[in-house]
Amino acid sequence: MKVLTVGGGGREHAAVEAFHRSGAEIYSLMKNANPGIIKRSKKYKIADERDIDAVCRFAKECGAELAFIGPEAPLEAGVVDALERIGVKCASPTKDAARIETSKVFMRELLEKYNIGGNLGFASFDRAEDAGSYIEGLNYEIVVKPVGLTGGKGVKVQGEHLHSFADIMQYVNEIFDNNIGGAGVIIEEKAVGEEFTQMVFCDGTAISPMPLVQDHKRAYEGDIGPNTGGMGSYTDADHLLPFVTASERNEALSIIQKIVDALRKEGCTYRGPMYGQFMLTADGPKIIEINARFGDPEAMNVLPILITDFTDVCNAMAGGTLSGNVEFERKATVCKYVVPEGYGVVSKAGLPISVNEESIEKCGAFAFYANVDRVNDELVTGTSRSVGVVGIANTIEGAESNCTRALEHVTGEAITVRRDIGKRELVQRRVDRMNELRSLNK
Ligand code: AMP
Ligand code: GLY
């Protein structure tokens, strides 16, 4: 089958490998020359991923039968709607359905309207002064977010990044003054607990779960520093996480099912992978955000252990025929992103990087290329995350050790990694913290 993929990051490289394993003929469009994607593509095009005309022209030229859109920006631009108009089936949501991610206000209001559990207190504002008076009247800690898309980097949390009312207002003003996200500001109740990601495949009605993943958004070891798109992530062999019980997981799945049902009732049926970011609090899972796509890095954890044929799964999502559960190997995975120094603040980019794929595979790991580019025949870093390295084994510890050994085979100038991800101490800290929160609630 001829499959068009859009996007040039680590998540899309992982998807392309899964399509390749299932025998698809791959055509790819991306803004950077990702060598991992290029290697598997019959033909590729470097273009703006949000350029609807360019995407449709390329889809026609290749005779694409099915399209998969990795990142959120082309979804927001309406790439799926345009592809469907020219008869290409899509395993990704339309512009209207993708509002579940592209507008945080739409998401929170949908939860409210359909009385779906896991919501948090929130209000959105078009003027800094109004946000200020609202915040003064609250008796809980808050999180400040731009309403629109910011690649996961626009969120600031009281008690972590913001320490006083003055700090909060300074950031609110900065969002308006610099038009960050482009759509105003949302003030949310701060949820306290441990975060986990529940992704599902969705065909408009039915969902099928993927293994739970824990991502690490903070830039530096010990979970400090600015929020990033995600520095690395792990999964466990039982597809739960050491600090999440099966019933807590089921609660998250039931919230996602209700969101899918609500979107259908709103006339914007959702087809494609859906991503739920939850905070597991003493009071159960609360929704931090819903994304209209696979997570990045989370896709790199789950897709390499996917057993069911990926092209079949995508066809079923696109066609509304998902039935039975999609299967994954019972393996643990640890992904660590090699990023340019300064990532999250100001990246040192445009420097050479080299990846020895063969040696990495010998360590029981895979490398997924992300925001790298080829300049004068040399692979160089971009300003975002460079290469995801994923170790796979029977336990988290084993996967972490494979990943760490494999990381030695990524070399370059001014690159760095959060080494603590997936290590026993960090995982244990999460388990202890969750136990403590649960005991406080008793
Ligand atoms: P987002 O881009 O919305 O996923 O936010 C980035 C990160 O900010 C999340 O992964 C959380 O760590 C944190 N965060 C966002 N919203 C909240 C919230 N309501 N309560 C606590 N932490 C939050
Ligand atoms: N890992 C976070 C995201 O993909 O949004």
Image (spheres, grey):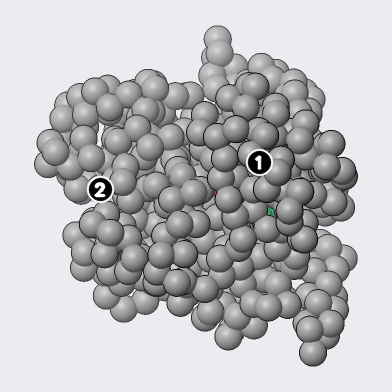
Q: Nearer the viewer, residue 213 or 255?
A: 255
Quadrant, the C terminus: bottom right
Circle number at residue 388: none
Count of marks overlaid on the render: 2
| Outermost residue, bottom side | 442
Q: Disc 1 and disc 2: Cα gap in Å?
A: 39 Å
Question: Given contact means CB atoms under 8 Å apart, are the residues at marks 1 and 2 in contact?
Answer: no
Q: Quadrant of residue 279?
A: bottom right
Estimate the x, y position of residue 397 in percent, counting from the top left: 76, 67
316 in relation to 12, above or below: below
Would residue 166 be visible to someone looking at this image? Answer: yes
Estimate the x, y position of residue 268 in percent, counting from the top left: 27, 54
Estimate the x, y position of residue 290 in percent, counting from the top left: 50, 56
**Residue behind mark 1:** 131
Question: Which residue is depicted at the point 21% across and 29% down?
Answer: 56
Q: Earlier in the sequence, mark 1 or mark 2?
A: 2
Estimate the x, y position of residue 227 in percent, counting from the top left: 72, 42
**Residue behind mark 2:** 90
Question: Which residue is depicted at the point 32% across and 60% down?
Answer: 263
Q: Quadrant of residue 25?
A: top left
Q: Is residue 375 shown left or right of residue 242?
A: left
Residue type pointed to by label 2: Cys
Would residue 335 be visible to someone looking at this image? Answer: no
Q: Residues within 10 Å of mark 1 (few under 14, many from 20)?
A: many
Q: Quadrant of residue 287?
A: bottom right
Residue type pointed to by label 1: Ala
| Helix, strand or loop status at disc 2 | strand
Q: Is residue 98 shown left or right of residue 287?
A: left
